[in-house]
Image (tube, rainbow, N blue to C red):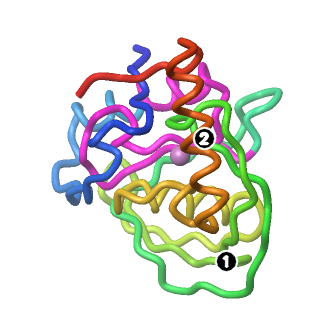
């Protein structure tokens, strides 16, 4: 089932999400629905707050085309190593149509749980590393525009306002 993606400035995107404690059927259905929603929206990642749930989990695929070949489910992530620096262009399904260069760590090591509650560790560089950082930010109520220089962030906010007035940017309810 496809879920509604909440867009900036929805308040849910600003809340710190709660740890997942129940690894049950309900969680599995949510993860399945989030992957379906992410692929449908042609995103590389989708975090629970983006579908209106304040939970510490996200899904991603750093190689969605052409075969959706690397779906991942990350629950209760924790960074255990961060290193280097890289500047690349980034977007977000919750800020559709806006893109900017964002500074991130080049390489990260993340501890997390899978859908059954098993502990896992992943080491990532490049695109996967960037997605892990972007999606983990969502769990803290942080958006990529928060990581931009003030002038750039204000330009994007102004642009969104203009698009809202033109009916060209979908604002979502609580
Ligand atoms: Co995002």
Q: Nearer the viewer, mark 2 or mark 1?
A: 1
Residue 43 sits inside the magenta stretch: yes
Q: Is residue 148 left or right of residue 106?
A: left
Q: Is residue 94 left or right of residue 9?
A: right
At a point 56% along the width and 56% down the height, the residue shown is: 144
Residue 4 sits inside the magenta stretch: no
Q: Quadrant of residue 101?
A: bottom right
- Who is closer to the viewer here, 10 or 126? 10
Q: Is residue 65 left or right of residue 40?
A: right
Q: Is residue 111 above or below residue 4?
A: below
> Which percent across, then down, holds residue 36?
52, 23
At a point 37% along the width and 51% down the height, the residue shown is: 57
At a point 54% along the width and 21% down the height, the residue shown is: 169
> Which percent across, then down, holds residue 151?
64, 61
How many C-alpha atoms fall within 10 Å of the one at disc 1: few (<14), some, or many (≥20)?
some
- Which residue was labeled with disc 2? 71
Q: Quadrant of the C terminus?
A: top left
Q: Quadrant of the N terminus?
A: top left
> Which percent across, then down, holds residue 113?
37, 61
- Total number of numbered labels? 2
- Return the disc, 2 or 1, that comes first in the chain's sequence: 2
- Who is closer to the viewer here, 74 or 97? 97
The residue stretch that appears in magenta: 33-62
Q: Secondary structure at mark 2?
A: loop
Disc 2: residue Cβ within 8 A of ligand 1's nearest atom: no
Residue ranking furthest to the left: 22
- Which residue was labeled with disc 1? 105
At a point 27% along the width and 42% down the height, the residue shown is: 11
């Amino acid at each position: 089932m496809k879920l509604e993606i909440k867009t900036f400035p929805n308040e849910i995107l600003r809340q710190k999400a709660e740890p997942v404690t129940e690894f049950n059927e309900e969680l599995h259905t949510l993860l399945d629905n989030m992957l379906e929603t992410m692929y449908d929206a042609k995103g590389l990642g989708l975090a629970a707050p983006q579908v209106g749930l304040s939970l510490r989990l996200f899904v991603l695929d750093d190689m969605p085309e052409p075969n959706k070949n690397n779906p991942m489910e990350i629950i209760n992530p924790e960074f255990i190593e961060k290193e280097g620096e890289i500047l690349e262009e980034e977007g977000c399904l919750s800020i559709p149509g806006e893109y900017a260069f964002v500074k991130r760590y080049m390489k990260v090591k993340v501890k997390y749980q899978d859908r059954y509650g098993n502990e896992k560790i992943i080491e990532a560089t490049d695109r996967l590393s960037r997605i892990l950082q972007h999606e983990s930010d969502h769990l803290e109520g942080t958006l990529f525009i928060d990581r931009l220089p003030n002038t750039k962030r204000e330009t994007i906010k102004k642009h969104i306002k203009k698009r809202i007035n033109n009916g060209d940017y979908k604002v979502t309810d609580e």
